[in-house]
Amino acid sequence: MASVVSREYCLAHPVEISQLYGLNVFLGTLLNTKRTVLERVAETFSENRLAMPGPLGDSYQLSELFELRAARIYQAMAERFADVLPAHHLFKDLQEEEEEHARLMHICLYSVRMSPDVQYLPSVRDPEIRITMKQLRAVQRRVPTMTLAEALLVSEELEQGEVNLIFGRLLKQVAEPEVGLLRQMMRHAENHQVTVPRRIGLLRAQLDKLGLKA
């Protein structure tokens, strides 16, 4: 899994990490390798800050829920294809990466402030949002009966869909410095719309060599 902020970066920049997120985040990362940096930041912000209320806060909670729904879909796919190890590992990685994206939206929820940059406020009342919610639920229900080929196709479609667009637009409009670093880190890594089709292509080639159909 690719963490948004790697442990190596955190340990190499103790002053920056401590100033932005608190000394406990740096020390926790130093002493315990089992949790990601964003897990610690999200927990720290939840304990010490107030979430943004109203429609603005609702927008970031909505995106967090979408990312968690995508993570649950990939978790179900990993369980469905547990006996096809290359596919299982890919879906497990995607699950963990979507969980990182959800943590990033959670951090934004505790960081975002009203500013001229805030122009996008998706709501559960929006027709396109309700359609997306319905589609994600339908995909999750279908996973237990999917073939691997269907699961890979759905994964490609999911990464090109509304969930990533909402995530990107909401991340872009948070001006606070603690999110600025996270946004910079996201830029250093190609986004899922680019990497997931490539990784799926590599998986298909690997499965072909093993004589497995995908």
Image (tube, helix red, strand yellow):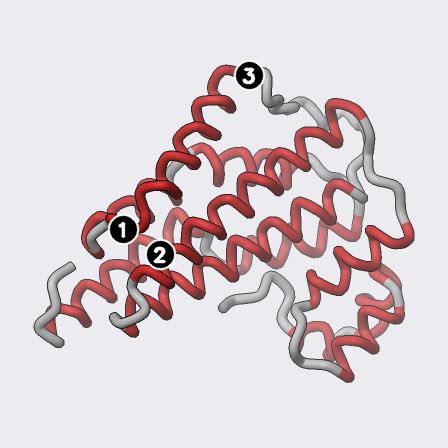
Q: In the figure, is residue 147 to the left or right of 6?
A: left
**Residue 20: x, y in percent?**
84, 59
Q: Nearer the viewer, residue 81 or 8?
A: 81
Mark linked to residue 77: 2
**Which quarter of the image is occupied by the C terminus?**
bottom left
Q: What secondary structure is found at the residue carrying circle 3?
A: loop
Label 2 crowd (10 A; few <14 / some 14-19 / many >=20): many
Label 1 crowd (10 A; few <14 / some 14-19 / many >=20): many
Q: What secondary structure is found at the residue carrying circle 1?
A: helix
Answer yes or no: do the residues labelled 2 and 3 have beta carbons within 8 Å?
Answer: no
Mark linked to residue 37: none
Point out the residue furthest to the bottom here. 31
**Residue drawn at (57%, 55%) of the image:** 99
Q: Nearer the viewer, residue 117 or 192?
A: 192
**Residue drawn at (65%, 77%) of the image:** 34
Point out the residue furthest to the left here. 211
- Disc on the earlier residue, 2 or 1: 2
Rendered image quadrant of residue 213: bottom left
Answer yes or no: do the residues labelled 2 and 1 have beta carbons within 8 Å?
Answer: yes
Label 3 crowd (10 A; few <14 / some 14-19 / many >=20): few
Q: In the figure, is residue 118 to the left or right of 144?
A: right
Q: Considering only vertical position in the picture, is 121 above or below 207? A: above
Q: On the image, numbered disc 3 is attached to which residue?
A: 126
Q: How far, Cα to Cα, is label 2 from label 3?
A: 29 Å
Mark linked to residue 151: 1
Rendered image quadrant of residue 83: bottom left
**Residue drawn at (43%, 51%) of the image:** 192
Q: What secondary structure is found at the residue carrying circle 2?
A: helix
Amino acid identity at mark 3: Asp
- Disc on the earlier residue, 2 or 3: 2
Amino acid identity at mark 1: Ala
